[in-house]
Structures are given as structure tokens and as C-alpha cells.
Amino acid sequence: MTNYPNPAALLLEAARFSAERHRNQRRKDADATPYINHPLSVAALLAEHGVADGEILAAALLHDTVEDTETSFEELEVKFGARVTAIVAEVTDDKALPTAERKRLQVEHAPHKSPDARLVKIADKTSNLTDIVHSAPGWPLERKQDYFDWAKDVVDLMRGINAELEAAFDAIYAQRPTE
Ligand code: ZN
């Protein structure tokens, strides 16, 4: 349980908190979109594909706060409760590790994730691929293709949780850049 009287209050506070924590970050697109657009899009993807559980949606809004900002799990737990925090923890990489090792571990750990964490993870990858397709960060083609292929490796190990969301991932994966 959380400290909020209803799911809307929880979600709005999670969005406000996440926006405040990510306030100095921008996405890597040409327009340097405010970072908060990414967690908002992850939560929106889930909601659009049938996920109405406020705690999963709150975890989606908060999913990058510990990994990418000065936010602790303890802080999330006090504010948003144990379940939201556990989901965020499951989708948080250990930033002390080199990027290649973090990517390898995401593949290794994918089959062991909880259903709640799988939903957030698949939506996160879908959002990231969508950003690469539509806002074309200045990445070389091979880097984009590697990201697409790695994202698919991770998602393929988590399937069977939400067919609609997985189809949304497949639809954006089908736009894997080739030139
Ligand atoms: Zn993310």
C-alpha cells in the first residue's frame, strides 16, 4: 500500500517527483527533449496496452530515478511504498559496472524478472526504440542496430506477459534502421 488516497494521486505525485529529479537531464534527440518525456511515454504505453495498476504505472514513471539521478531506494520506499520500489529496483542497472557488462546482465537476468518488472522493461525498450526511429540521435547506424538487436534479445526473454505490448515492441522493432 502507498500513502495516496487513490491511484490518480499516486501517479501525479510520481510524475511530479520524477520530473523534479530528472529536471537537469535531456534526451539525446536533436531537440534535447526534457528527460521526463521518456518515463511519461513508458507509463503511457503501459496504460494504452491495458495496464491499469497504479503501482506499476508509478514504477514506470520512476523507473530511471535511481539509475540516473540522486535518488535512493529508501527514499522511494518511504514515498511510494515497497511494491513500487521493488519494481524500480528490478529494472535498475548497477551503474558501477561497465556498459557492456550491464547490457550482458540485462539479458542474463531477463528470464528471472517478475511480471510487473517485465511490463516496465518491455515498455522501456519500446520507448527507447521509438525515440531512435523518430528523433534519430546522432548515433552511427551500427550503434542503432546493436541497440535494436540487444533490446530484442532482452524482450524475447520476457515474452508471454502482455501480447498487445509485445506487439507494440515488435512493430517498432520492424523499423530497425538499415541505412
Ligand atoms: Zn528508461
Image (cartoon, grey):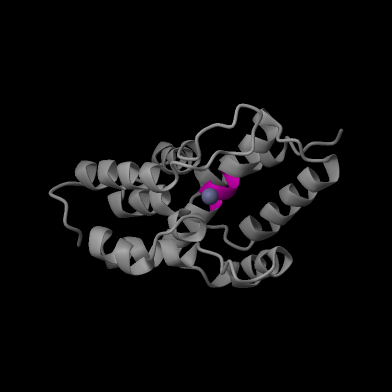
Residue shown at 63%/63% (left/top)? 157
Q: Residue furthest top?
A: 31
Q: Which residues are magenta?
A: 122-126
Q: Does 123 appear in magenta?
A: yes
Image coordinates of residue 72 in percent, x first then y, are 38, 65
The residue located at (42%, 38%) in the rendering is 44
Q: Is residue 165 left or right of residue 140?
A: left
Say above or below: 11 vs 179: below
Q: Position of residue 57 (x, y in %)?
A: 36, 48
Q: Visible in this render: residue 161?
A: no
Res. 138 in view: yes
Query: Which one is in front, 18 or 43?
Result: 18
- Which residue extends farthest left? 5
* Quarter of the figure that contains the N terminus: bottom left
- Vertical position of residue 129 compared to residue 134: above or below: below
Query: Residue 46: x and y, percent?
Result: 43, 44
Please tell me whether residue 179 is drawn above or below residue 96 in the rendered image.
Answer: above
Q: Is residue 169 left or right of residue 55?
A: right
Q: Quadrant of the C terminus?
A: top right
